């Protein structure tokens, strides 16, 4: 199925033989055809494609991100946005308030605003009380559309891949460039969220007539759909899509997730798939970023290993991906981790794609990561853990469940204690290491 010119290309190993193509979505999640979808692997693919789209913009740019860092990639994006404004393009930028506190210096925010970019912070109040549930309701999604014609969706923030405080670079993540009918949903959700922020902050409201309608004409023949998670009408949309896909999997399910702490329903879906004979592979990060989460997740390993699920821990650098491939046909790329924060509290956005070529590219990229930088967790070795290690994991697991019962938890925003190295690097605003 031709998709036109690809931004990147990877050799694609043979995918599992499929006798008939199953449906991986419920009626409510039905995917529409007519899309051109391009996989973007890391910042090396993402930022050039994003900046090219900005430089081609004629009317408007809408950008949502959790982080906007003042580093090499962040500066390149900022300069492209400023160039667009100077051409008369209206630029609306929405950044999460907590993410801005961590990475957006006042000097860069002022520079963007002074250039004419309409900068807003999502929930700029950052409460210090850890037991206030609402402090975890952050804008974690990464969305962008240009002129209502082309959009970007994924897990990549506006931050350089080499900017990984306390972790080994580069950051491993994915995004998607898409054109087609999905733009209607993207334009609608971005306009809705920004309007809510504008109203809450008594900011000038961008009226619907002030922005372009989405271009929804067919741009290809790929089936795709946008999934968003919010705290109103779409609380479980992304989780439900995962569960449905796992329930229909016939041969293989590969899930790569940076912050992985699934609930019981998700655990059962993984185990049920494995027991049906599906080869289930979890690609998780080995490196310690949040110690409590690191130990708690390992409480689940024994159950998964006993069910025949393969666990691969990525150690070569900083895994930040949130993607999955089912049967070499169905794929999802987005901002949502598989944890309570993403599934229950944050605003998230994923794209689901039903296309063997796209899924094959993503599958090949994941297999490459496994082959080049992951270590398998072997059941026999896992059984030989010391009693101290087992007790530590059980204590961490119980602590997180208690926290969730009280407030909810956020493995990405600082409630769970970071490793000492990561905390010190962030506090010192460590400079970027030189690129190899």
Image (cartoon, grey):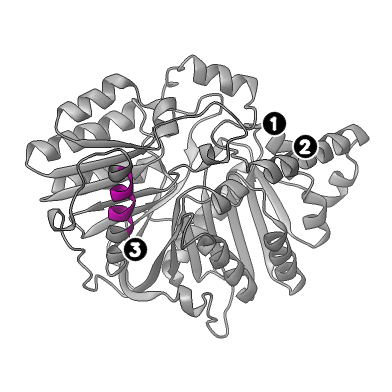
Q: Residue at x 36, y 26 (%)?
A: 104
Compared to residue 156, the image places residue 352 above or below, namely: below
Q: Give the magenta-colored segment's residue range.
A: 189-197
Give the camera-side residue of 351 and 346: 346
The CA distance from mark 3 to mark 1 is 37 Å
Task: Residue 315: tell me if it is visible.
Answer: yes
| Residue tagged 1 | 291
Q: Which is more foreground, mark 2 or mark 3?
A: 2
| Residue tagged 3 | 37
Q: Residue at x 36, y 29 (%)?
A: 69
Q: Quadrant of residue 281?
A: bottom right
Q: Position of residue 193 (x, y in %)?
A: 34, 51
Left of 134 or right of it: where is 181? left
Which secondary structure, mark 1? Answer: helix
| Residue tagged 2 | 396
Q: Position of residue 165 (x, y in %)?
A: 51, 24
Of marks 3 and 1, which one's residue comes earlier in the chain?
Answer: 3
Q: Position of residue 294 (x, y in %)?
A: 70, 37
Query: Magenta stretch containing residue 317, yes or no?
Result: no
Left of 176 or right of it: where is 107? left
Task: Residue 436: tell me if it is visible.
Answer: no
Q: Quadrant of residue 266?
A: bottom right
**Residue density around tag 2, few if under 14, some if 14–19, many if 20 or more, within 10 Å:** many
Magenta: main secondary structure equals helix
Of marks 2 and 3, which one's residue comes earlier in the chain?
Answer: 3
Q: Check the picture and name the quadrant holding the C terminus.
A: top left
The CA distance from mark 2 to mark 1 is 9 Å
Q: Which mark is residue 50?
A: none
Which secondary structure, mark 2? Answer: helix
Asked whether disc 2 touches disc 1, contact meaning CB atoms under 8 Å apart, the reply is yes
Of marks 2 and 1, which one's residue comes earlier in the chain?
Answer: 1
């Amino acid at each position: 199925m031709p998709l036109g010119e690809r931004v990147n290309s990877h050799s694609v190993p043979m995918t599992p033989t499929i006798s008939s193509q199953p449906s991986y979505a419920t009626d409510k999640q039905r995917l529409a055809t007519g899309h051109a979808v391009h996989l973007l692997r890391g910042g090396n693919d993402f930022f050039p494609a994003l900046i090219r789209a900005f430089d081609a913009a004629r009317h408007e740019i809408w950008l949502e991100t959790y982080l906007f860092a003042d580093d090499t990639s962040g500066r390149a994006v900022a300069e492209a946005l400023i160039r667009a404004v100077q051409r008369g393009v209206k630029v609306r930028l929405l950044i999460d308030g907590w993410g801005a506190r961590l990475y957006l210096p006042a000097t860069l925010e002022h520079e963007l605003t002074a250039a004419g970019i309409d900068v807003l912070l999502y929930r700029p109040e950052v409460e210090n009380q850890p037991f206030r549930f609402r402090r975890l309701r952050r804008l974690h999604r990464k969305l962008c559309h240009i002129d209502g014609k082309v959009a970007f969706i994924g897990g990549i923030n506006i931050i350089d891949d080499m900017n990984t405080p306390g972790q080994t670079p580069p950051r491993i993540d994915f995004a998607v460039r898409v054109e087609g009918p999905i733009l209607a949903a993207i334009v609608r959700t971005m306009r809705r969220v920004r309007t809510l922020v504008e109203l809450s902050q008594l900011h000038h409201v961008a009226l619907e007539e002030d922005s372009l309608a989405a271009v929804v004409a067919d741009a290809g023949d790929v089936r795709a759909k946008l999934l968003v998670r919010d705290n109103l009408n779409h609380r479980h949309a992304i989780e439900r899509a995962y569960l449905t896909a796992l329930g229909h999997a016939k041969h293989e399910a590969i899930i790569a997730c940076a912050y992985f702490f699934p609930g019981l329903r998700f655990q059962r879906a993984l185990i049920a798939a494995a027991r049906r004979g599906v080869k289930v592979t979890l690609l998780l990060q080995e490196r310690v970023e949040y110690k409590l989460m690191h130990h708690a997740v390992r409480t689940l390993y024994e159950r998964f290993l006993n069910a025949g699920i393969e666990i691969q821990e990525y150690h070569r650098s900083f895994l930040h991906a949130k993607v999955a491939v089912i049967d070499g046909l169905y794929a999802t790329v987005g901002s949502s981790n598989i944890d309570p924060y993403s599934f229950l509290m944050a605003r998230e956005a994923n794209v689901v794609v039903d296309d063997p070529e796209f899924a094959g590219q993503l599958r090949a990229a994941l297999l490459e990561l496994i082959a080049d930088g992951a270590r398998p967790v072997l059941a026999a070795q896992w059984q030989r853990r010391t009693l101290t290690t087992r007790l530590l994991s059980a204590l961490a697991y119980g602590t997180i469940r208690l926290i969730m019962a009280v407030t909810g938890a956020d493995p990405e925003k600082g409630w769970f204690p970071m490793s000492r190295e990561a905390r010190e690097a962030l506090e010192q605003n460590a400079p970027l290491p030189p690129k190899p």
